Each structure stands twice: as C-alpha cells, then as structure tokens.
Image: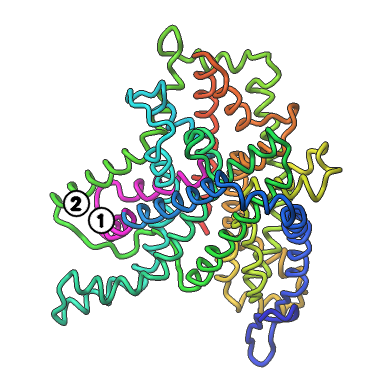
C-alpha cells in the first residue's frame, strides 16, 4: 500500500539510501486529476440525467453497444487463437526471425487513419484486390488482428519463455502426451497472459474509432463512433456523455481484469535460447510465418502501391500535388501543425512520464496503477471530457497538446520503468556515500544510466502523438489541421486526385511512425 512517504529502501552495510515516492506520486496524482479525473467527472455530471434515460430507452444505442461488445469479443478470441501457435513457432530458430519479430511490433504505432487507408487501398471500392469489403465484419476484425497480434504474442511469449517450456518438457518426460502436457501444464501457466492479451485486445477494439469510422459504415459503427457523431453532427452533449458512461463502465471492468492478470506478466520477444530445427523444417516454418505476416500486413503494401497510382499512370504525382497544394490544408501546413502539436505534447508527456516512472520504480503500487489510467480511457471520451470541463480552452491549442500528452505519457513511462528498476543499488549507495543528495543522484547517476530508455520512450510517445486521431477529431479547429485530419478530409472528398493524395499522405505518415518505432526498438535494445 502506498503511504506517500519513503519506500524502496536500498541496504548499504547498515546505512540505507531512501528513495522517496511521495513527492513523485503527488505530482502524478495532481496531473491525473486535471487531465483525466476532472474531465471524466464533468462527463458523469452531464451524462447522469435525461441523456442517460433517453439512451437506455433507445434501441439504436443498445445496438451500437452490443455490436461494440461483439466486436471486442470476436477480435479477442481470434487474436488469442492465432497468437498461441505463433508464440510456439517463435521458440524455434528460423531464417529471418529477428526481422520477423521486429516487424511484428510495427503495427502498434501505426496511426488508425493510416491503417484504415491501407485497407481501403487493398479491399475498398478502389482496392487492388477488386473485392470491396468496406462495411463488413471481415475487414474490421482483420484490422483488429493487424493491430493486436504482435502485442498478444509479446505477452504470451514472456510467460512461456519464463517457465512454460521447461515444465512442459518435464511433463513429456514423465509420459504425458503433447496435448495433455499443453492442457495440464502450459495452458494454466499461460492463463494470466491469455486474460491480459485478450483484455487489451478487447479494450482497444471495443473503444476503436478510426477504423470503424472509415470502414464500418452505418451498420458496424462502434459506440465510440456514435459518441463522435452525437457531438459533431447534433451537438448532443447529454447523449454523448451518457454513451461515454456506458463505455467507461465496460472499460473499467475489463481493465481491472487486465491489471489483475498483469501482475504475473513479463514481456519481450528477445531471441534467448532458441530451439534448433532441421534446415528443411526451419525453412518451412519461415515460409508459413512470413506468409501469414504478409496477409496480415498486406494493407500497408497496398497503401504503398496505391500512393503511386495517379489518373495518368504510376508515378509520384500524388506526392507532387501535396507539395504544391494551396487549399490551406496542404502537406506543409499539415506537417507544421502535426510537428508543433506533437513536440509540444512530448515536452509535457516526458516530464509527466518521468514522474510516473520514478514513483512506480521506487515502489508506489498505487502510482503504478493510477498512471495507466489514460490507456483505458478512449481518446474520444477524453475529448468529450475536455470540451465539458474546460470550455474556455476550446480556442487554445493547449487543449490539443494536453490530450496528446495525456494519451502518450504512459507509453513513455513504461519504457523507462524497467530501466530504473534494473539499476544496481550499489551505484546509488556509492553516490550517497560520496555526498550526493537525492537530486544530484537523479541527474548525475540515474538519468544518464537510463538514457537509452528515455530516448526510446520519447520516440514511442512522439509516435503516439503524431498519429492521434480520435481526440483530434473532436478538439481540432480548421487552422490546426494535422496530417491525420488532412487524410480524413481527402478520403471524404470525391475524385481520384483526392484519393491519391490521401494515399500519399498516409504513406508519409506511416513511414514517420515506422521510423519512430524502430528508434524506440533500438533504444530498448541499447537499454
């Protein structure tokens, strides 16, 4: 239990270096109160009234709610079903494994608008395959699989690598069949990982916005899309707040289960001790895995090809038109807005994330859990809260920067926390023995040693801000148009030229997000 005082004491031959968690946790709680709790309280005040009664009596809203539940459950089951054999396959050495593992994590940072554009390029009305899956369950579940398969594999791999493989081998030695060893030994060990990976997949799918907005159509709009429509087209704050209440209740329940299961998790897809395979079997395994990855990631390949298609034939015409656009939301204006808002968000997310990381790494369990709160509040719900709680900030770009930073700082912190926890206690003892105070130890010892983790966390937070779409749709003003909004606007306009420009702009944003991800991955490796 966090008492807000000293914790995480490090033994040192009779003298102990005290690492204070109270001040760091207090700063985190104050930020969460301003950026998350007060806005949500404003939503609750507005939603607990006539809007809630009307929403409960409206069968259409119940349909959106039930479909969102169905979508989340269906995606979770499919992701777990495919992640299990993938995790077993990753225990073996095969050609291209390191690159395969690296690419498996790329979808995590892909902006939703980019992924939606990729699916339109592949299976949309003008898609390369000639099959229009827009407005179908297939394309929505495929998109969820694209996003969540790598995340689920990382979670399950950590548990399996820690103990499952050895215990399963022991059961086989004692005469258990492969199936019996899996059911009686491995599956119970993977239980927390299955719950955590399935829970996260459900959270991200149930509250998804960008992909259902562009690909789901009227029939398969999620609750998150309906919240946006109520505000954007009807200015119905009461109805939108009521639906946010429904959504928050479900997300809180599922997130609680994830946090409970997450206590037993360890992540990573590092090579470790890989089992060898005969060359022929290794090549066959590689072919199957790379083929599966190609199917999952095919929308990104289609996006790259479609960005080069112009009304006059293949070429760079779409990109050239972006450079010469004069409609006020051309490439240069969108890049400038994206850059200034994202960098501003990073300047806020980095110190808040560091405060969170210091509180969590030094033993504050309450701060460790509280700091994850923004990950379990949907961006659209957060935007609704800001509009209700801070109406005077609607004309200020700070409200957009605050939303970006709130959604990004947990990603920064989760990269730094393991590095801080991994520091040798003797280093801090030695610094204290030489007369260094707490602040001097922090800036001269701890932060320099975790510099790679700080850089990787910054890259991940920046990637999150660059691709943010849900909150931006609610909070943005015409003069603040970002890359994600510019893509959405072009996709909504008729004509091949607008479609081609949207594909080109999406490809540029995908490249930026991918480069930031590999910077994060490299930093994590160095850390």
Circle 2: is it few (<14), some (14-19), or many (20+) Cα within 10 Å? some
Magenta range: 82-110
Q: Residue furthest front?
A: 57
Q: Where is residue 499 in the image (x, y as percent from the top left)?
A: 51, 19
For this orientation, the residue located farthest to the right is 392
Q: Are marks 2 and 1 in contact (CB under 8 Å)?
A: yes
> In the rendered image of this protein, does residue 475 appear above or below residue 262?
above
Which secondary structure type mostly characterizes the magenta part of the structure? helix
Q: How crowded is mark 1: few (under 14 residues within 10 Å), some or many (20 or more)?
A: many
Q: Residue at x 60, y 32 (%)?
A: 484
- In the displayed structure image, the side of residue 98 where residue 309 appears, left or right: right
User: Residue at point 52% right, 44% down?
Assistant: 109
How far across and down, in percent of the image, does residue 436 sit?
76, 74
Q: Where is residue 467 in the image (x, y as percent from the top left)?
A: 59, 39
- Element marked by disc 2: helix
Label disc, if present, on residue 282 of the rendered structure:
2
Q: Answer whether residue 115 is visible to the viewer in this image.
A: no
The image's mark for residue 352 is: none
Q: Name the residue under label 1.
A: 93
Q: Within the magenta stretch, is there residue 307?
A: no
The residue nearer to you, when weighing 67 against 350, is: 67
Residue 377 or residue 293, whichever sits in front: 377
Q: Is residue 488 above or below residue 25?
A: above
Marks 2 and 1, how far apart at CA: 7 Å
Residue at image coords 36%, 57%: 80
């Amino acid at each position: 239990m966090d008492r807000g005082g000293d914790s995480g004491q490090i033994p040192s031959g009779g003298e102990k270096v005290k690492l204070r968690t109270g001040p760091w946790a207090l700063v985190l709680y104050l930020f969460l109160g301003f950026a998350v709790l007060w806005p949500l309280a404003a939503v609750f005040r507005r939603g607990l009234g006539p809007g809630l009664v009307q929403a409960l009596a409206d069968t259409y809203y119940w349909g959106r709610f039930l479909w969102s539940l169905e979508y989340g459950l269906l995606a979770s089951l499919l992701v777990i079903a495919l992640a299990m054999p993938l995790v077993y396959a990753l225990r073996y050495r095969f050609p291209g494994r390191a690159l395969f593992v690296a690419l498996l994590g790329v979808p995590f940072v892909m902006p939703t608008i980019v992924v939606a554009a990729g699916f339109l390029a592949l299976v949309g009305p003008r898609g390369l395959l000639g099959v229009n899956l827009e407005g179908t369950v297939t394309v929505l579940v495929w998109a969820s699989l694209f996003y969540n398969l790598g995340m689920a594999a990382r979670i399950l791999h950590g548990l399996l690598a820690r103990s499952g493989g050895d215990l399963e081998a022991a059961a086989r030695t004692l005469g258990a069949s492969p199936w019996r060893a899996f059911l009686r030994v491995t599956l119970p060990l993977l239980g927390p990982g299955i719950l955590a990976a399935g829970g996260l997949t459900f959270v991200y799918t149930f509250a998804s916005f960008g992909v259902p907005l562009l690909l789901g159509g009227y029939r398969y709009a999620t609750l998150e899309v309906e919240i946006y429509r109520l505000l954007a087209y009807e200015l119905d704050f009461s109805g939108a707040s009521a639906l946010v209440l429904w959504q928050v209740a479900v997300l809180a329940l599922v997130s609680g289960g994830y946090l409970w299961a997450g206590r037993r998790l360890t992540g990573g897809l590092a090579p470790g001790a890989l089992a060898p395979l005969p060359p022929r079997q290794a090549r066959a395994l590689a072919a199957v895995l790379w083929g599966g990855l190609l199917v999952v990631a095919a929308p990104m390949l289609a996006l790259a090809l479609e960005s080069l298609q112009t009304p006059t034939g293949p070429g760079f015409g779409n990109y050239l038109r972006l450079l010469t656009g004069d409609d006020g939301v051309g490439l240069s204006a969108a890049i400038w807005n994206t850059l200034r808002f994202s960098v501003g968000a990073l300047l806020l997310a980095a110190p808040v994330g560091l405060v969170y990381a210091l509180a969590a790494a030094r033993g504050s369990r309450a701060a460790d859990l509280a700091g994850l709160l923004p990950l379990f509040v949907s961006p659209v719900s957060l935007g609704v809260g800001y509009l209700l709680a801070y109406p005077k900030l609607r004309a200020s770009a700070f409200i957009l920067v605050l939303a970006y930073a709130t959604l990004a700082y947990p990603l920064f912190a989760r990269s730094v926390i393991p590095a801080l926890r991994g520091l040798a206690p003797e280093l801090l003892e030695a610094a204290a023995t030489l007369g260094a105070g707490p602040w001097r130890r922090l800036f001269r010892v701890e932060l320099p040693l975790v510099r790679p983790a700080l850089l990787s966390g910054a890259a991940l937070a920046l990637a999150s801000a660059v691709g943010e779409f849900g909150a931006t749709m609610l909070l943005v003003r015409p003069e603040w148009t970002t890359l994600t909004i510019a893509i959405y606007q072009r996709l909504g306009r008729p004509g091949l030229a607008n479609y081609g420009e949207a594909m080109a702009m999406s490809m540029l944003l995908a490249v930026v997000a991918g480069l930031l991800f590999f910077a994060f991955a490299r930093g994590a490796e160095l850390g």
